[in-house]
Amino acid sequence: MTSFAWLKGHGTENDFVLLPDPDGTVHGDLDPGFVAALCDRRRGLGADGILRVVRSTADGGAEWFMDYRNADGSIAEMCGNGVRVFARYLADEGLVDTSGPVPVATRDGIKVVTYEVEPVETIAIDMGAPRLLGESKVAVDGRSYAARHVDVGNPHAVAFVDDLADAGTLLVEPQYDTEVYPAGVNIEFVERRGPQHVAMRVHERGAGETRSCGTGAVAVALAAAAADGVDPADGDVTYRVDVLGGTLHITWRGDGHAVLAGPAVIIARGDMTWLG
Ligand SMILES: N[C@@H](CCC[C@H](N)C(=O)O)C(=O)O
């Protein structure tokens, strides 16, 4: 029976269990069955994913590596809200100097974190340059929608709908083209709310419907900007993306990079002996 430290945090209600493991000696290679049990909302603590906090061994100047796992135990390349919650933890523990940019290593390379205090406390991540790809189709509740393929390090399909209710209960995964997405996909349904303002719901690969998805919000903002004919080369453009758990802001910069900004909090911490 092992005991270990854990924390719980969320970014716009995309929630994570954090497992500090600085030297990689506590959890080693996380067992997918253990991750799934821990994330289960009935037989575990409940979370959309796990963030193992481990020292980075990669080149690139990042001291910390975010070892992210989906709730079903699978590995994903990237998690935008995960990086923001991870960064909140590093700051709260005094593990990084928040007065300047902080690089964090992920499976999708280094992401640069900026801590903003004014006008509200926000954690912003330079997500690199996402790629707007082609169109395919997704289907939910017997209706099919055109969906834009956006690669934010992980795969997304963005479908515009008249009303977010069109996405149904999202208790089951919408259908998608497995030839376009052989490794699965995160699917966002988007409703227009105003100029450069949209709302979304998401069905995440490996987690089901969640109340927010950072990479999903980036995919949605870029798909909306492209549909609006906006070119960031003419100047930075910011979209407000409402998710079920709050609001995120995505800035698409002239250099093609997308910056994801929003709140992130740690809500609990403790030591656990896992009996499950
Ligand atoms: N919630 C995350 C995305 C997590 C990974 C995703 N489920 C996948 O499998 O690609 C975010 O905030 O980006």
Image: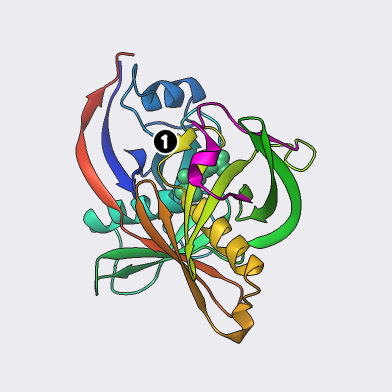
Residue placed furthest toward the right: 179
Using the image as rendered, state which of residue 113 and residue 259 is in the foreground.
259
The quadrant in which the N terminus is found is: top left
The residue located at (30%, 55%) in the rendering is 88
**Label 1 secondary element:** loop
Instruction: Name the side, left or right, on which 243 lies relative to 132.
Output: left
Compare residues 235 and 78 and report the one nearer the observer: 235
Q: Which quadrant of the figure contains the C terminus? A: top left
The question of residue 107 being in magenta is answered with: no
Q: Is residue 33 visible?
A: yes
The location of residue 146, given as percent across then percent down, is 71, 48
Instruction: Inspect the image, locate mark 1, and give the three-letter code of the amino acid beneath it.
Output: Asp
Residue 165 is one of the magenta-drawn residues? yes
User: Where is residue 183 drawn, in percent x and y?
Assistant: 69, 37
Magenta region: which residues? 159-177
Q: Position of residue 133 (x, y in %)?
A: 73, 58
Q: Which residue is mark 1?
A: 48
Where is 169 relative to 211, above or below? above
Residue drawn 45% across the image and 32% down it:
28
Residue at the spot x=59%, y=43% of the render? 187
Asked if one can make out residue 21 in the rendered structure from this viewpoint, the answer is: no
Mark 1 Cα-neighbour bin, 10 Å: few <14, some 14–19, many ≥20: many
**Which one is in front, 178 or 18?**
178
Query: Which residue lies most toward the front here?
Result: 162
Q: How many marks?
A: 1
Residue at (55% x, 26% y) in the render: 172
- Label 1 CB-ligand 1 distance < 8 A: yes
The image shows residue 61 at horizontal and vertical percentages of 48, 65
Taking the image as shown, residue 166 lies to the left or right of residue 248, namely: right
